[in-house]
Amino acid sequence: NAGVTQTPKFQVLKTGQSMTLQCAQDMNHNSMYWYRQDPGMGLRLIYYSASEGTTDKGEVPNGYNVSRLNKREFSLRLESAAPSQTSVYFCASNPRPYEPQHFGDGTRLSIL
Amino acid sequence: QKEVEQNSGPLSVPEGAIASLNCTYSDRGSQSFFWYRQYSGKSPELIMSIYSNGDKEDGRFTAQLNKASQYVSLLIRDSQPSDSATYLCAGTIYRGTSYGKLTFGQGTILTVHP
């Protein structure tokens, strides 16, 4: 049982390049989330999708877009990468809003 | 004030001792609380959930919730070196369109020394 799968695990980009981070869950969860984690800043919510067909901004959405492709998949896109977006990105999912979230292994993204 | 705050760390305890981790939250609409453990370079792993006032025990872990004081804690009994990690407190905050979103504290680094 894979749970939440994120690809890629590591990526280096140059400033201005674009990239899409992929996330898929096989637990039939309704809600999915994207976070970034930076030293001293904790986990911060970028975007979330409460259910298939809906997306909403989180705490730090600027510079990102998301797509809830279907119930399983939720992607995060950086249109024009900036060094400030260097971070570890985590995708998470849960069956319903008040239930625990399950995290993927993360994507470590460096932007030069 | 941050929505979820954890007491300043890092915390260092000897093996076999009780580690006490604390968290306060600002929004009285908060409904659910979770403790996650995160090893260096790894993703957060759920260790405890608590939804109502009182204590909840699971093995060596006890979570405590006091909604009147807006306080959540995690006790780790008989601490082991393998418990050394960052512990994240998180709560779901209800505020209109913020329904169900999880807010994390900054984390407390715990070191258990032999």
Image (cartoon, grey):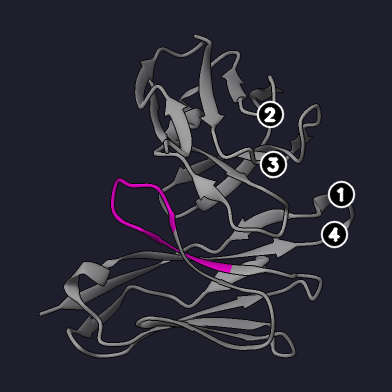
**Residue denoted by label 1:** B97
The answer as to whether the residues below labels 4 and 3 share one chain is no
Q: Residue B95: which numbered mark, if any?
A: 4
Judge depth for marks 4 and 3 and give the one in front: 3
Q: Residue at x 71, y 40 (%)?
A: A30
Q: Residue A71: which numbered mark, if any?
A: 2
Q: CA distance from mark 1 to mark 3?
A: 14 Å
- Within 10 Å of disc 3 (Cα), the crowding (few <14, some 14-19, many 20+) is many
In this rendering, would A84 be left or right of A98? left
**Residue denoted by label 3:** A31
- The reply to whether callout 4 and callout 3 are in contact (CB within 8 Å) is no
- Of the residues shown, which amino acid type is indicated by label 2? Lys
- The reply to whether callout 1 and callout 2 are in contact (CB within 8 Å) is no
- The image quadrant of residue B112 is bottom left
Instruction: Specify start and end residues of the magenta stretch as a single range.
Output: B34-45
Q: Residue at x 50, y 52 (%)?
A: A41
- Identify the mark nearer the N-term, 2 or 3: 3
